[in-house]
Every structure is written in structure tokens, then in C-alpha cells.
Image: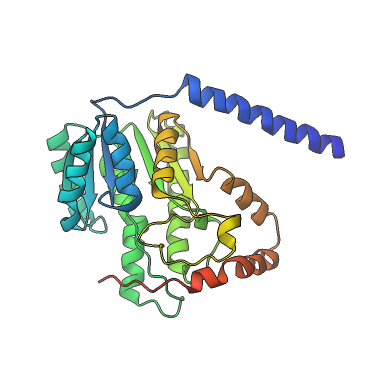
Amino acid sequence: MFWYFIYFIVLIAFYQLINLIYRRWIVREEPTQSTAILITGGAQGLGRETALIYAQKRCKIAIWDIKYDLLDKVKSEITQAGGTAYCYKCDISDRQEVENTARRTLDDMGKIDILINNAAIATHLHHDEIKENHFRKLHEINYLGHAWVTLAFLPHVRHITVIASVLSFIPALKESDYCASKAAINAYFSSLRIELKARKSPVKVTIVYPYHIFTKMFNDMKFGHVKYLLPSQKPGDVAKAIYNGICEKREEIFVPGYAKVLCLIALSFPSEVRDWGNELLFRDACESLKPLAYN
């Protein structure tokens, strides 16, 4: 049995090495000046950092965001970095608004090659503290909104990317609504990927699973000593991982890379053990989050 285990580990290591070579040096495709990218929730945080990376490649970048006051600033930053920016105010929870804005975007840009579904909100409330309108709004943005945007652009794109989370697999205190939305994203886009493959579609689907990112949504989270064991991710580092993953046509991107191993290890334990470890490591950090509210 021991040697079977060793063979299994060697086989996995060999596969990972071949996959790395294949992705990094054979199928990798860098964007060009003619590449058109759409990023939802792109006016700040991870979306903004990702947009600036593509701007350095002189790409055409469409930014959708509900925060109109931030669009002019990010447009200027994209232009200064070398890209061409198209900015639109859009509430992705409204399907009709999504379809209208999609038509405007395609009319202005001519095409969209890469779609990056990034927009998200959180409440940081216990399950019995969440108001119904906030619960609905979160799922309409975090899950349904990405579905509406994807369906609007599916006939036009070459690559679809969505930002899920390690919370798709591992639950967290005060994040029942957020975790549920990320789990829904994982299930929906994994199923979409399988359906597209079955139809021999050339459209690629990439799901991103980041660990805690130090953005405005989660920047008041106090991890204590856990931060030395599992450090928070900088938005710029996650954006680079997304960029490289898309270039390499990866279907899954865990950030940091070892997060996938940690998720697999955690899921191998009974729920009682997982919940005990979750409370031991993350209870204080989750409780430190200040509630957010959205109208």
C-alpha cells in the first residue's frame, strides 16, 4: 500500500510538471493591442488591478461598475498605463440593463475577446441578521449578475473568467450569504465549462479561487497570528495570477497555488473536524469584520 501511495504522488508530480510546460511554453497566448477585455466591477480593487495589467499590454478595456464616480479615475489610469478605456455604469443585477449595456459595449468596441466577471458585494452579517433585500441583492450581483453578463456575451467571446473564492469550498462565520453565492458561481461555471466542451465550443472558461484578498471589502479583517500561516493576498498579485492563468488557458486558478491543496486536505476530514479547525483559526478574524449594507 505504501508503494502505491508513492507511485500516486510521483504520478501527480509528473503530471503537474508536464502541465506546467504545456501551459507556460506551448499554449500560452499573450494579448495584443487588438484584444478587447470586459471587466465587471473594474473601477476598484481586484478589477482595477487586472485592468491595469491589460492596459500595460495596450489592450482595449471595457469597465463596468455601478459606482459612476470612480469610472473617470480608472479610465484615466488605464489610458496612462497605455490601454484604451471604455467605461459604463451598469448594475449587473438588472438583466435588462446588462443586455442594454452589452449592446452599447459591442457597438463601441466591435468585439469582446475576454470577459472577466469580477463584481461582488458582501454583508458580513450572521445569517439571522441579514435583511431580505440585502440577501437578494447580494445573490443578484454575486451570482445571477455574472450569469446575465455571461449569457449576453457568450456568442461573442473567446474566454470567460469568473472570480469565485476558496469560500466556495470552505465556509466562514458571518459569510453564509457570500459563501453561498461563491459556491453557486463555482457550480454554474463548472457546469457551463462542461456543456461548452460537450458542444465542441472554442470558448474557454476559467474559475478563480482566491484566498483572502486585501481589498476594501475585507480590509478590516484582523487575522492575528493566522496571518503568518496564511497571509492575505495583495490585489496586484492576484491580478497577475489571473492574467497568467488566462494567457495559459487554465481552467482553475487557486491563489495562492497551495490553496487548492489546503482545500483538498480540509475536505478530507469529517465536518466536525473541519468546523473545529475553522473556529480555531478564523472565528476572531470573521467576527472582526464590520457589517456592510447595500440599498
In the rendered image, the quadrant that contains the C terminus is: bottom left
In the rendered image, the quadrant that contains the N terminus is: top right
Q: Is residue 14 left or right of residue 239?
A: right
Name the spot of residue 189 as percent of width and height, x first: 43, 46
151 vs 143, nearest the viewer: 143
Q: Is residue 130 left or right of residue 93?
A: right
Name the spot of residue 172 as percent of width and height, x first: 53, 66
Q: Please, which residue is most extreme toward the bottom here?
A: 128
Name the spot of residue 51 as percent of width and height, x first: 29, 41
Query: Quadrant of residue 290 in the image?
Result: bottom left
Query: Quadrant of residue 213 in the image?
Result: bottom left
Name the spot of residue 26 as percent of width and height, x first: 48, 19
Q: Is residue 12 left or right of residue 148?
A: right
Residue at point 49%, 67% (across, down) = 222
Q: How is the image coloured?
A: rainbow
Seen in the picture, residue 33 relative to 222 is either above or below; the reply is above
Residue at point 32%, 27% (across, down) = 31
Residue at point 66%, 63% (across, down) = 274
Q: Is residue 196 visible?
A: no
Q: Please, which residue is most extreme toward the top here?
A: 26
Total numbered labels = 0
Residue at point 42%, 56% (across, down) = 214
Q: Is residue 47 visible?
A: yes
Q: Is residue 113 left or right of residue 281?
A: left
